[in-house]
């Protein structure tokens, strides 16, 4: 099993930056994928950025060039968010996969004011 705890959300003005963190514990050496997802009110949860155990990254088109996903050796996942826009406002969730199993964090709120 894996436990995920997000932090770093908050209120920021448009154009500002935030850095989200997701601390993983448990069977971290078996994680093969980690990602950031977000869910805005009235919308479906969507993938923001993901990173595989081999270091391959992928981003939603809406955040390319503004957000950067990274992961350290302790499997703490980060999301550096720059040039934030009001449409980035959402609850951000961390997800990890171990084989057929999915694990999610509790989410952290990001609010971008115009």
Image (spheres, grey):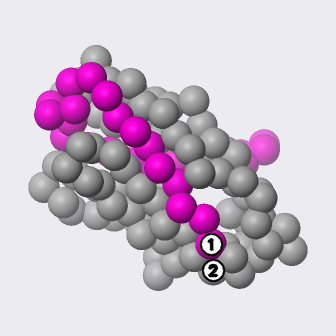
Q: Is residue 50 left or right of residue 33?
A: right
Q: Classify mark 1: helix, strand or loop.
A: loop
Q: Residue at x 46, y 60 (%)?
A: 79
User: Which quadrant: the C terminus?
Assistant: bottom right
Measured along the vertical axis of the image, is residue 86 above or below residue 99?
A: below
Q: Residue at x 59, y 51 (%)?
A: 8
Furthest residue to the right? 114
Q: Which residue is mark 1?
A: 17
Residue 29 location in percent, x, y? 14, 34
Q: Which residue is mark 2?
A: 83
Q: Quadrant of residue 112?
A: bottom right
**Residues packed near mark 1 inside 10 Å, few (<14), some (14 to 19) or many (20 plus):** some
Q: Is residue 85 left or right of residue 55?
A: right
Furthest residue to the top? 1
**Residues packed near mark 2 inside 10 Å, few (<14), some (14 to 19) or many (20 plus):** some
Residue 61 visible? The answer is no
Q: Residue at x 54, y 61 (%)?
A: 19
Return the mark for residue 44.
none
Which is in the foreground here, disc 2 or disc 1?
Answer: 1
Residue 26 visible? The answer is yes
Report if residue 72 lies within the magenta region: no
Q: Classify mark 2: helix, strand or loop.
A: loop
Q: Pick whichever of labels 2 and 1 is earlier in the sequence.
A: 1
Residue stretch in magenta? 17-45
- Contact, CB < 8 Å: mark 2 with mark 1? yes
């Amino acid at each position: 099993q894996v436990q995920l705890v997000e932090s770093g959300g908050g209120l920021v003005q448009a154009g500002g930056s935030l850095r989200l963190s997701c601390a993983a514990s448990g069977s971290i050496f078996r994680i093969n994928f980690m990602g950031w997802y977000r869910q805005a009110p009235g919308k479906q949860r969507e993938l923001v950025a993901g990173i595989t155990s081999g270091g391959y990254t992928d981003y939603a088109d809406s955040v390319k060039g503004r957000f950067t996903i990274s992961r350290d050796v302790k499997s703490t996942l980060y999301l550096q968010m720059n040039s934030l826009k009001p449409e980035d406002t959402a609850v951000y969730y961390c997800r990890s996969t171990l084989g057929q199993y999915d694990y999610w964090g509790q989410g952290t709120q990001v609010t971008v004011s115009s």
